[in-house]
Amino acid sequence: MTEKTTILNLPEDELVHPGNRACAGCGLSIVYRIGLKALGRNTILVVPPSCLTVLQGLYPIAATQLPCLNVTFASTAAAATGVLGALRALKNKDTTVAAWAGDGGTSDIGLQALSGACERGEDLIFICYDNEAYMNTGVQRSGTTPQGVITTTTPFSGKAQIKKDVPAIIAAHGIDYVATASAAYPLDLYDKIVKAKTIKGPKYIHVHTPCPAGWGFEPRYTVKLGKMAVESGLFDLYEIENHTFRLTGASEKLLGKKRKPVADYFKAQARFRALDDAKIAAVQQEIDEKWAAYSPPA
Ligand SMILES: Cc1ncc(C[n+]2csc(CCOP(=O)(O)OP(=O)(O)O)c2C)c(N)n1
Ligand code: SF4
Ligand SMILES: [Mg+2]
């Protein structure tokens, strides 16, 4: 079994400058800081319009020390493919190309380019930070916004449709590495990115990323909210490696244990205020059924 990273052996090298334009308590700030430590200095980032472009800022006062291509919304994985081609022409075999997009830029607008890159087998890491809406433009619903969430485009009874399962869609391409992670478990995310760097071909990591501004909770609760999503069994940490699924980290530890009620997670956020008890009970039942399938009775 590979040694897990702890806070004691995380690299000290900081690739994100202190002070950036993200909101206080932004989950993306955690994901980005730890994610860049895992990717390392020999990395080229490809980023579409999103809160990340705001967090990174503009040259010459950018928050990141890595080279970064800011590209059009729909083109992230296609632009990353172009960077890979340029590196091949330069006979550069060791630079990592990481496409890094929000949920809107991944699950909706960038999905065809991502699908194409997966189908062609491009050697890139695609990281989606899922804050479950188009946050940078003022909280519009996206394909990954959960059912019932109030956004500026679903203002009354919340989003009618269910959350799009993007990791499952990408896994259906048959690529060798798909994983989920959470801003609340940065070391698990770190280890997954480090592992992804060792695998040839497309790698996809989907990161649940609490957003105080868009979800309606106090900035100091970012990690707590992320943990509640995992500990309730709503958002699961897993890997699909060489087509084999396994729960990891905090989700693996939940197997056979009592999970926290999902109602606590919903009630801690203003965006779920339209959910009544019957809808919450229906989600709880879905979670219970999913977990019964993870650990069928002996
Ligand atoms: C083609 C196109 N449509 C719309 C926009 C405006 N826009 C910029 S960022 C953004 C939201 C991105 O949402 P997401 O990918 O979830 O990232 P987040 O802002 O949540 O971090 C939108 C709609 C754009 N730049 N290009
Ligand atoms: S809107 Fe949300 S994701 Fe965007 S910078 Fe603010 S807290 Fe972070
Ligand atoms: Mg988003």
Image (tube, rainbow, N blue to C red):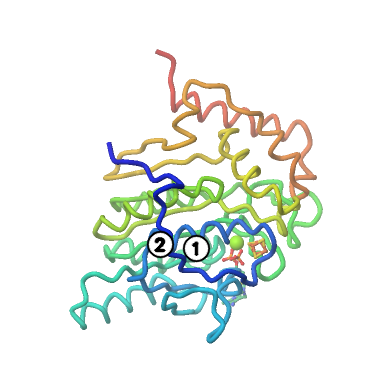
Q: Amino acid at mark 2?
A: Phe
Q: Quadrant of ligand 2?
A: bottom right
The residue that label 1 is drawn on is 106
From the top left corner, tell me how far across and down residue 237 is, in percent. 47, 41
Residue at (46% x, 68% y) in the render: 15
Q: Amino acid at mark 1?
A: Thr
| Closer to the camera in the image, 133 or 120 | 133
Residue at (43% x, 47% y) in the render: 8
Q: Name which quarter of the figure residue 226 lies in.
A: top right
Task: Determine if the C-beta at disc 1 is less than 8 A from ligand 1.
Answer: yes
Q: Residue furthest top?
A: 298
From the top left corner, tell me how far across and down residue 171 is, in percent. 37, 49
Number of numbered labels in the structure image = 2
Instruction: Tell me whether the residue at label 2 lies in contact with that at label 1, contact meaning CB atoms closer than 8 angstroms.
Output: yes
SS at mark 1 in the image? helix
Residue at (71% x, 46% y) in the render: 148
SS at mark 2 in the image? strand
User: Which quadrant of the rendered structure holds the C terminus?
Assistant: top left
Residue 43 appears left or right of 232: left
Disc assigned to residue 126: 2
From the top left corner, tell me how far across and down residue 166 is, in percent. 47, 52
> Crowding at label 1, few (<14), some or many (≥20) Cα neighbours within 10 Å?
many
Q: Name which quarter of the figure residue 228 lies in.
A: top right
Residue at (51% x, 45% y) in the render: 185
Q: Residue furthest bottom?
A: 60
Residue 293 appears left or right of 85: right
